[in-house]
Amino acid sequence: MKYLLPLLLFIALSVFLAIGLKLNPREIPSPLIDKPAPAFNLPVLATPEQRLSQADFKGKVWLLNVWASWCVSCREEHPLLIELAKQNKVLLVGLNYKDEAQAANAWLGKHGNPYNVSVMDADGRVGIDYGVYGVPETFVIDKRGVVRYKHTGPVQPGELENIFLPLIEKLEAESA
Amino acid sequence: MKILYALILCLFVYQAQAEIEYRDFKQPEQEQAYQTLISELRCLVCQNQTIADSNADLAKDLRRQVYEMLQQGKSRQDIVDFMTDRYGDFVMYKPALKLKTMLLWLGPVLFLVIGLATVWVLRSKTGSSDEQLTKEQQAKLNSILEKGDDA
């Protein structure tokens, strides 16, 4: 009986520490969830004389994937994005973040281009509006232009099937 | 002794500032506001540094953002709101006091109170169990005091 309380305290402490170990300190909840996707009006990477804004995707479920040719972990998730593009289930928009057009185009040429379109955020201002802090990042935006999900860091193999695809399916079923 | 002097001198070393850009301010208050803000905003890439301390690209961009907003005449609160709208409360080294951050602010006080209460309960328990010595114990104690322990 004398040892019961310390034992319980120890167990409680262990549980808290175990949970703490499993949490990812890099995963910061985005305040943008359920808010309208921040506005942008950026030149298209392939054809810089053309510009696109978030409003151009209204009525569609789309992914905004933040990437850069200098980003090492973008290479890691790249095969998954290629796979996603093949399935042709969702509009994949690339936000080419703080990059140079030439390097970005060369990167896509070398590794393959999964994006329906990429826009250039050369000075990272749109990145700030989206709260980007660790490339790659992926936003899921619904038909009304509202951010519904954010993923920081490279998308892992299981996450595509378990998180992204079911969410996209659900959002596709919603009315615009 | 030399080592001691060296150690004492170490106390006066200020934390290095990574910031290298030259910023031009019209009023000294604005510069003050800039310095204060950049030392209160967290660099989210290198989470234990402020954007004043960090050389990360994002920190540079956020310093530029703060500077530009000050130039546009935005207030301190405007800038804080701008940052927390995009990056969440975590971007502030000193998060605002609200329901969501209550545990963060009151947690330490709560633990102190629990600790003090525990100490108080334990002390009052042992205090009450302090019994008077029986006659035999008192006699034994007296004999030990007189002759020493090994008697």
Image (cartoon, coloured by chain):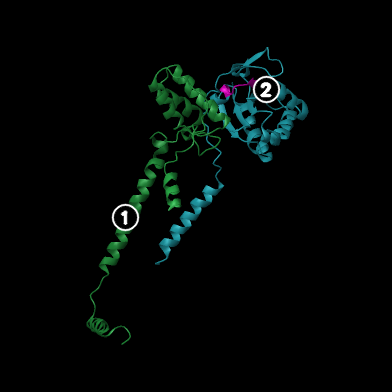
Task: Depth check: give the residue in front, A142 or A2.
Answer: A2
Name the residue type under label 2: Glu
Horizontal arrangement in the rendering, residue A109 relative to residue B123 (left or right): right
Chain drawn in green: B
Please give the range of residues in magenta: A118-126
Q: Which residue is mark 2?
A: A100
Q: Which residue is mark 1?
A: B117
Label 1 sits on a secondary structure element that is helix
Q: Residue at x 36, y 47 (%)?
A: B110
Q: Residue at x 60, y 29 (%)?
A: A139
Residue farthest toward the right in the current orientation of the protein: A110
Chain drawn in cyan: A
Q: CA distance from mark 2 to mark 1?
A: 61 Å
Q: Do the residues under discs 2 and 1 have CB atoms within 8 angstroms? A: no
Horizontal arrangement in the rendering, residue A171 relative to residue A12 (left or right): right
Name the residue type under label 1: Ala
Asked whether residue A136 is drawn in magenta, I would say no
Horizontal arrangement in the rendering, residue A83 relative to residue B121 (left or right): right
Residue A47, image quadrant: top right
State whether discs 2 and 1 lie on one chain.
no
Chain identifier of the residue bearing label 2 in the image:
A
Label 2: how many Cα within 10 Å (few below 14, some 14–19, many 20+)? some
